[in-house]
């Protein structure tokens, strides 16, 4: 049986790393939608976490919202570069809406997407199980943690930095990995993801 015949029997298209038009459109749409979400979340963050000092540690439990595109987009399109692409589009839209952090949002989006991308690349873009999504989400949070430590919280002591890391990791596992997994499954049940590979791992 050829790969194409097997794909038709299983309902999955043949796996290829080549980007299709629909892959580009879906990833871009995810980025734009979450860019709008980011714009709202930026406002929420400035209310609960003043930029003049280290925010309350519990604020970092909601940090994961900014990382969702880095896991959700790849889990749907399953193409190299999807994590970075989606995060950069979202960051760009957020910047257009007037991010309080200015152009640095683009750098932040890049490092968050690149960290998740590295995890998916290590699986050769073949394993989309919840544990892998969790590792990718935590990797994205770790990149954000390092970035923010260097640029915004350099004066905080090590204990606070470690507590911040734990809070961000929890946020990544619950909001990013769990949220992306459930959202992808929900979208698939509606049929809007027909033509994309179904979850096999």
Image: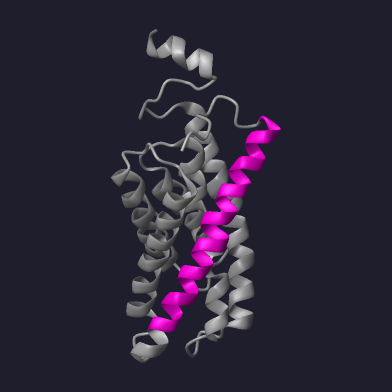
Is 121 drawn above or below residue 139 in the view shown? above
| Residue 16 seen in render | yes
- Residue stretch rendered in magenta on the structure: 162-191
Is 107 drawn above or below residue 180 in the view shown? below
Residue at 42%, 12% in the rendered image:
4
Is 57 drawn above or below residue 146 in the view shown? below
Residue at 62%, 47% in the rendered image:
183
In the picture, the quarter occupied by the N terminus is top left
- Between 50 and 76, the residue placed more toward the observer is 76
Is 142 drawn above or below residue 113 in the view shown? below
Count up the numbered dots.
0
Q: Position of residue 106 (x, y in %)?
A: 41, 60
Q: Position of residue 143 (x, y in %)?
A: 36, 66
Q: How is the image coloured?
A: one colour
Q: Position of residue 188 (x, y in %)?
A: 63, 35
Residue at 52%, 19% in the rendered image:
10
- Between 148 and 135, the residue placed more toward the observer is 135
Q: Which of the 4 quarters of the picture holds residue 93?
A: bottom right
Residue at 39%, 50% in the rendered image:
84
Q: Is residue 104 left or right of residue 28?
A: left
Q: Position of residue 27 (x, y in %)?
A: 50, 41
Residue furthest to the right in view is: 190
| Magenta residues, dominant SS class | helix
Residue 22 belongs to the span the image colors magenta? no
Q: Which of the 4 quarters of the picture holds residue 98?
A: bottom right
| Residue 101 seen in render | no
């Amino acid at each position: 049986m050829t790969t194409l015949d097997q794909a038709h029997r299983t309902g999955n298209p043949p796996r290829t790393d080549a980007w299709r038009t629909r892959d580009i459109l879906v990833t871009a749409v995810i980025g734009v939608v979450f860019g709008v979400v980011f714009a709202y979340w930026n406002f929420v963050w400035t209310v609960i976490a003043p930029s003049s000092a280290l925010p309350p540690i519990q604020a970092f439990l909601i940090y994961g919202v900014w990382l969702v595109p880095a896991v959700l987009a790849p889990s749907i399109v399953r193409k190299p570069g999807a994590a970075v692409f989606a995060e950069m589009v979202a960051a760009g839209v957020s910047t257009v809406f007037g991010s309080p952090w200015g152009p640095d949002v683009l750098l932040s989006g890049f490092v968050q997407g690149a960290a998740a991308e590295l995890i998916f690349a290590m699986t050769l873009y073949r394993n989309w199980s919840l544990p892998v999504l969790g590792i990718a989400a935590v990797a994205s949070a770790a990149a954000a943690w390092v970035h923010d430590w260097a640029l915004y919280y350099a004066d905080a002591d090590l204990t606070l930095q470690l507590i911040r890391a734990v809070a961000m990791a929890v946020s990544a596992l619950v909001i990013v990995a769990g949220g992306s997994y459930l959202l992808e499954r929900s979208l698939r049940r509606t049929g809007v993801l027909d033509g994309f590979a179904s979850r096999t791992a």
